Image (cartoon, rainbow, N blue to C red):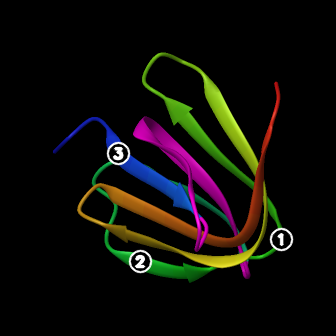
Amino acid sequence: MSKLLNVEIVTRSQILWEGAATHVSIPAEDGRLGILPGRQPVLAVLADGVVEAHSEDGETIRFEVSGGFASVDVDFVTVVVEQGSRLEA
């Protein structure tokens, strides 16, 4: 089992962020969903809120997002949002 997730946070027109993360947290329609390496595959519809990716160097990357979905498959996390902007720490 890998200790890192490969993460992409994208819109239809651009990549907002991609990199390795120790864990990711997303605002799913039915509640906040935490994703760790080794998680079973899942497809989740996103609510408006904040996506957080915790990078391997300890930085927390945060995005305010509106709509979209997240897909998790074998330590690959793809978050596709209608609109998103990075939040500064």
Neighbourhood count class around disc 3 (C-alpha, 10 Å): few under 14, some 14–19, many 20 upward = many
Residue 36 vs residue 45, the one in the foreground: 45
Residue interval drawn in magenta: 11-30
Q: CA distance from mark 2 to mark 1?
A: 19 Å
Mark 1 neighbour density, 10 Å: few (under 14) some (14–19) many (20 or more)? some
Q: Residue at x 78, y 76 (%)?
A: 47
Residue 37 in magenta stretch: no
> What is the three-letter code of the residue carrying label 1?
Asp
User: Marks 1 and 3, Cα distance to the nearest angstrom?
Assistant: 23 Å
Q: Which residue is mark 2?
A: 42
Give the quarter of the figure containing the C terminus: top right
When the figure is inspected, residue 34 is found, relative to residue 87, above or below; the finding is below
Q: Could you tell me if residue 46 is visible in this image? A: no
Q: Secondary structure at mark 2?
A: strand
**Mark 3, mark 2: which one is toward the viewer?**
3
Q: Residue at x 62, y 52 (%)?
A: 25
Q: Looking at the picture, does residue 34 appear above or below residue 60?
A: below
User: Looking at the image, is 4 positioned above or below residue 69?
Assistant: above
Q: Position of residue 74 (x, y in %)?
A: 23, 62
Using the rendered image of the protein, determine whether residue 30 is visible from the camera's viewpoint: yes
Residue 22 position in % (x across, y down): 43, 35
* Residue type at tag 2: Val
Residue at 83%, 71% (x, y): give it: 48
Residue at mark 3 to residue at mark 2: CA–CA distance: 14 Å
Location of mark 3 (residue): 5
- The residue pinned by badge 1 equals 48
> Residue 15: within the magenta?
yes
Which badge, 3 or 2, comes first in the chain's sequence? Answer: 3
Kind of residue at disc 3: Leu
Q: Position of residue 87 (x, y in %)?
A: 82, 38
Residue at the limit of the structure toward the left, as seen here: 1
